[in-house]
Image (spheres, rainbow, N blue to C red):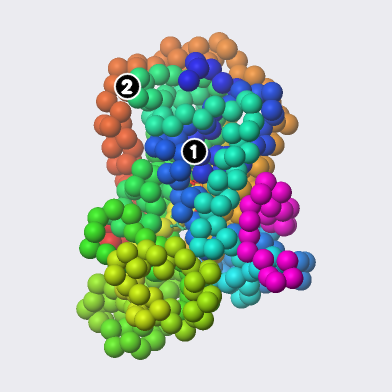
């Protein structure tokens, strides 16, 4: 790792990678990630990525997104995402992403809760891995990008309301690394919850450092709990049973194997009815019955889910799967415009860590990969088009104001960051209660 780059990006998920792909090729770019590059939620995405199904789908897709978000969405952001969805998914295909196809070669589309029609592209039940791998290949083929793993952002390097880089711990060394622009693509916050589908290392560090430096954040208590994760007594990451399983016809059943809800309502509504049912039945889970889905469809569309359940001793072709809600997604985050700019100069935020309002109070299924990819591209282009080198004197002042001793204990800083985030969530929840699931933290 060098002392200075033109741009530093925090995160190797789809947002960080697509931002890098849209920066000028002559600029030096550093991408860091907290663990291995594959330890991103982007790699875990199962269900798919939305794509507008022609102009006639616009109103329906727009309304579905707004309905799921309880009307709290930023309509301009939704409009921008929908109008760019065909171009963005075409760009992925041109990078080699293999989406499922119909017999005539056209793109196959599936459905998930909250969608009034099929509009989700997918690759088996590992769409995220397919997309992330192809984006990573494209980034690695660039000559100007250095990727450093196990490199942890501990803080922003700032002078006034301007960002000049980061404090990074890499191995045993903690140092300041300078940049003209910094892009936070540091993902979700699941690691601060006991039960979450997210990688445990995703603890909302980007949001916490922004809170510390007075960079605006919004809706930090807008947290989505996915209705169906595999029930397990084991500790660690909860395994997601994709919503498209219900989209393809799976049923939710109570302890007496009766249906108790409409499985295709938006996530927060299904989660709430599952929690009510668990309380009424006094059970730690409800059942998910995949047997209404054709056997061939299960085999071709959901191989990873079949395998994971088999590892847990469950044969999805013969028996029901025990499922329980778990923390899944963060709708709130670092306030950002449609070009990824935050309220701090030279600092951008994209992907799950940012809040541009596109998801409102509740994200519609399969809108997240799309949002991350589109707004990261816009941030990359915004930096390219408005590039201005940082003032060396101000950057020097930022460095001079540092006391590197304060960063000696990195674990302590990360743990304090978690506390800062949890406190902000609690305070926001007190002001405007949003989440019935906090008891599960
Ligand atoms: C199980 C699961 C299934 C999903 N399915 C779908 C789906 O089907 N469709 C859909 O649209 N969305 C889905 N999502 C949501 C979607 O995958 C994520 O919202 C999206 O991929 C986020 O991308 P990102 O690039 O913002 O963050 P991530 O892909 O999570 O990447 C975050 C990166 O930031 C790095 N990072 C974090 N903190 C630091 C730090 N302090 N220092 C250095 N690096 C740091 C991490 O190491 C990582 O590289 C799913 C999520 C999960 C968990």
**What is the secondary structure assignment of the residue under circle 2?**
loop
Within 8 Å: ligand 1 and the Cβ of disc 1?
yes
User: Do labels 1 and 2 touch, CB within 8 Å?
Assistant: no
Q: Residues within 10 Å of mark 2 (few under 14, many from 20)?
A: few
> Would residue 324 be visible to someone looking at this image?
no
Task: For the C terminus, give its image quadrant.
Answer: bottom left
On screen, residue 219 versus residue 404, left or right, reads right
Residue drawn where x is 53% and y is 75% of the image: 297
- Residue 86 is one of the magenta-drawn residues: yes
On screen, residue 66 versus residue 353, left or right, reads right
Residue 222 x, y percent position in the rendering: 44, 57
Q: Nearer the viewer, residue 32 or 358?
A: 32
Residue drawn where x is 49% and y is 34% of the image: 10
Residue drawn where x is 45% and y is 35% of the image: 33
Residue drawn where x is 47% and y is 31% of the image: 32
Span highlighted in magenta in the image: 83-105
Mark 1 — residue?
Answer: 11
- Residue 138 is one of the magenta-drawn residues: no
On screen, residue 212 versus residue 343, left or right, reads left
* Residue 53 in which image quadrant: bottom right
Q: Is residue 126 above or below residue 36?
A: below
Q: Nearer the viewer, residue 355 or 21?
A: 21
Q: Nearer the viewer, residue 214 or 12?
A: 12
The residue positioned farthest toward the right in the image shown: 55
Q: Residues within 10 Å of mark 1 (few under 14, many from 20)?
A: many
- The answer to which of marks 1 and 2 sits earlier in the sequence is 1
Q: Find the distance from the CA under tag 1 to the CA under tag 2.
A: 20 Å
Mark 2 — residue?
Answer: 172
**What is the secondary structure assignment of the residue under circle 1?**
loop
Within 8 Å: ligand 1 and the Cβ of disc 2?
no
């Amino acid at each position: 790792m060098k002392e200075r780059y033109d741009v530093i990006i925090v995160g190797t998920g789809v947002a960080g990678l697509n931002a890098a792909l849209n920066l000028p090729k002559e600029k030096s770019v550093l991408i860091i990630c907290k663990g291995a590059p594959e330890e991103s939620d982007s790699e875990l995405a199962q269900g798919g990525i939305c794509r507008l199904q022609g102009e006639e789908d616009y109103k329906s897709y727009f309304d579905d997104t707004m309905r799921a978000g309880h009307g709290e969405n930023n309509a301009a952001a939704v409009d921008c995402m929908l109008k760019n969805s065909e171009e963005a998914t075409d760009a992925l295909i041109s990078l080699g992403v293999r989406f499922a196809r119909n017999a005539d070669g056209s793109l196959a589309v599936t459905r998930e809760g909250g969608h009034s029609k099929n509009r989700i592209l997918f690759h088996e039940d590992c769409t995220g891995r397919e997309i992330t791998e192809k984006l990573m290949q494209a980034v690695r083929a660039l000559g100007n990008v250095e990727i450093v793993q196990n490199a942890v952002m501990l803080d922003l390097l700032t002078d006034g309301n301007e960002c000049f880089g980061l404090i990074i711990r890499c191995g045993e060394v903690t140092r300041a690394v300078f940049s003209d622009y910094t892009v936070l693509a540091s993902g979700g916050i699941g690691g601060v919850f006991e039960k979450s589908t997210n990688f445990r290392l995703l603890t909302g560090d980007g949001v916490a450092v922004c809170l510390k430096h007075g960079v605006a954040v919004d809706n930090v208590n807008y947290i989505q709990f996915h209705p169906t994760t595999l029930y397990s007594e084991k500790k660690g990451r909860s395994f997601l049973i994709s919503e498209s399983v219900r989209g393809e016809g799976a049923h939710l059943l109570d302890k007496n194997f009766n249906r108790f809800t409409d499985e295709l309502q938006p996530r927060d509504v299904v989660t709430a009815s599952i929690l009510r049912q668990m309380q009424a039945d006094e059970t730690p889970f409800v059942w998910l019955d995949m047997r209404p889905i054709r056997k061939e469809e299960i085999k071709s569309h959901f191989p990873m889910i079949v395998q994971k359940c088999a590892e847990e001793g469950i044969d999805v072709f013969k028996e029901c799967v025990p499922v329980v809600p778990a923390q899944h997604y963060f709708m709130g985050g670092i306030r950002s415009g449609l070009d990824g700019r935050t309220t701090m100069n030279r600092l951008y935020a994209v992907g799950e860590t940012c809040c541009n309002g596109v998801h409102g109070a509740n994200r519609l299924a399969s809108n997240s990969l799309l949002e991350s990819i589109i707004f990261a591209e816009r941030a990359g282009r915004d930096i390219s088009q408005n590039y201005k080198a940082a003032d060396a004197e101000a950057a020097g002042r930022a460095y001079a104001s540092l006391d590197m001793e304060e960063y000696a204990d990195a674990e302590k800083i990360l743990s304090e960051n978690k506390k800062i985030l949890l406190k902000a969530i609690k305070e926001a929840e007190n002001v405007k209660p949003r989440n019935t699931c906090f008891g599960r933290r």
